[in-house]
Image (cartoon, helix red, strand yellow):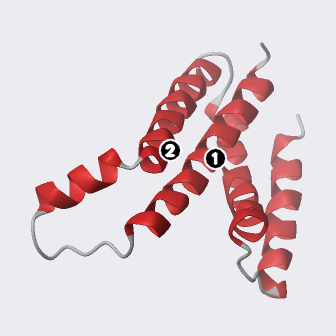
Amino acid sequence: MKPAWLLLVSVVCASLGQTLFKKGVLIIGEITLKGSLLKGLTELLSNPYVLSGLCLYVVSTIVWLVALSRTTLSFAFPFTALVFVLVMLAARLVFHEAIPTVRYMGLALICIGFLLCSLS
């Protein structure tokens, strides 16, 4: 598989992981640092959404490392900006979060920057 495809798989896994993290904490509720840290960690790690998000992050990291072994860091790293784009779109589509126009403009700038960086 070409490095660009591996990088895209890594980005999608990381984005899905973030989306699952949010779904998990919506179920758990607000997390505070008060009380038992062990109890809080147990609650987080026993949530299937949080656990699935962690698994996707592991997959994302492994695929990222494979991609890095096949290409330069200066080519690979701009792909991480796509996580911002996908997570914000997931926030809108999955959680129905309001996204201000200025953030959409920021996403457009990220996409333009990504395209410029990936030209080679």
Q: How many marks?
A: 2
Q: Residues within 10 Å of mark 2 (few under 14, many from 20)?
A: many
Of labels 1 and 2, earlier in sequence is 1
In front of the other: 52 or 18: 52
Numbered tag placed on residue 65 in the rendering: none
Question: Which residue ends up furthest to the left in the rendered image?
Answer: 36
Which x, y percent locates residue 77? Answer: 65, 42
| SS category of the residue bearing label 1 | helix
Residue under circle 2?
53
Quadrant in the rendering for residue 18: bottom right
**Amino acid marked by disc 2:** Gly
User: Are circles 1 and 2 on residues that touch, CB within 8 Å?
Assistant: yes
| SS category of the residue bearing label 2 | helix
In front of the other: 29 or 37: 29
**Amino acid marked by disc 1:** Leu
Question: Which residue ends up furthest to the top in the rendered image?
Answer: 1
Residue under circle 1?
16
Which x, y percent locates residue 19? Answer: 60, 55
Is residue 36 found left or right of 15 in the rendered image?
A: left
Q: Residue at x 54, y 28 (%)?
A: 59
Quadrant in the rendering for residue 64: top right
Which x, y percent locates residue 67? Answer: 64, 22
Q: Is residue 66 above or below residue 41?
A: above
Q: Residue at x 32, y 54 (%)?
A: 44
Q: Residue at x 64, y 34 (%)?
A: 10
Is residue 43 found left or right of 59 in the rendered image?
A: left
Q: Residue at x 79, y 28 (%)?
A: 4
